Image: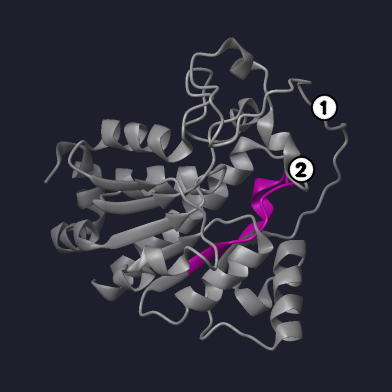
Amino acid sequence: MNGFLRRTQLLLGESVMERIAQQRVIIFGVGGVGSWCAESLVRSGIQHLTIVDSDRVCITNINRQLMATSKTVGHVKVDALKERLLDINPSAQIDARQQIFTEETAESFHIGDYDYIIDAIDSLKDKMLLIEMATRTKAVFFSSMGAALKLDPTRIQVAEFWKVKGCPLARALRQRFKKLKRYPAHKFLCVFSDELLQNEGHNATCGTERCLCPKAKMGPGDPALLNHEWCSSKAQINGTLAHITAIFGFTLAGLVMQDIKQRHP
């Protein structure tokens, strides 16, 4: 038993802690939600964790993403997060995969090999695909709905996907499922908030012509990185806050811990 887990063991007991250490978890998307989920899972005793994200750390990630600091801007997100997680538990097995979950790559993840699948993907198309595929496995699946444009932490909730209310992302997913007549194989829980604010500011970019995409040559240490906002090229950008995205991520991790405890009292 790792010494840092003594307080966790005190609450949950030795048998549950042993079970936690045996679980295999994969998180798709380690941004504002997924990064905090990963941290909570490792601090709670998860030993086998796969983290999936294709992006590099952007200057605008610092306001809400765990591994994003002035020192990690330009680094591959999953690599920066893996380093952080191994600082917490050097014996953890962290598989960092700089990839995107798409129709072309989906089979390569072998998601059926995991006990828990966590969705923190932004892309509507890819999120829908993950929901379909994950619910066809024996793994327990949890999903995060939209965490942007929120301020009130007391409005963050958990509900079954078809009962989520007030979330535009959940609504868009349900509409797309119905339109295509393709549906999840079974029900699953989502973390969401029914709060929906408006952006009060304007979206300002750094003006740098050099783009920091995963294939760019500009790397960590380049002074331009401290001002470059490569992620401003995304189709839609909304304001976010750390306490909201972190609570979303912690809640997802809490659902995993709760499920393990219930299955193995």
Range of magenta residues: 142-157
From the viewer's perspective, is 200 left or right of 235? right
Q: Position of residue 28 (x, y in %)?
A: 48, 56
Q: Is residue 97 above or below residue 211?
A: below
Residue on which the image places disc 2: 237
- Alpha carbon separation for disc pair 1 and 2: 11 Å
The residue drawn where x is 50% and y is 55% is 251
Residue 167 visible in the snapshot: no
* In front of the other: 237 or 109: 109
* In front of the other: 135 or 52: 52
The residue drawn where x is 67% and y is 63% is 124
Looking at the image, tell me whether mark 1 or mark 2 is earlier in sequence order. Answer: 1
Q: Position of residue 228 (x, y in %)?
A: 67, 22
In the picture, residue 31 is in which quadrant? Answer: top right
How busy is the neighbourhood of tag 2: few (under 14 within 10 Å), some, or many (20 plus)?
few
Residue at the farthest top position: 223
Q: Quadrant of the C terminus?
A: bottom left
* In front of the other: 25 or 167: 25
Q: Secondary structure at mark 1?
A: loop
Q: Is residue 186 above or below residue 202?
A: below
Is there a contact, CB below 8 Å, between mark 1 and mark 2? Answer: no
* Magenta span includes 122: no
Q: The disc labelled 1 sits on which kind of residue? A: Ala
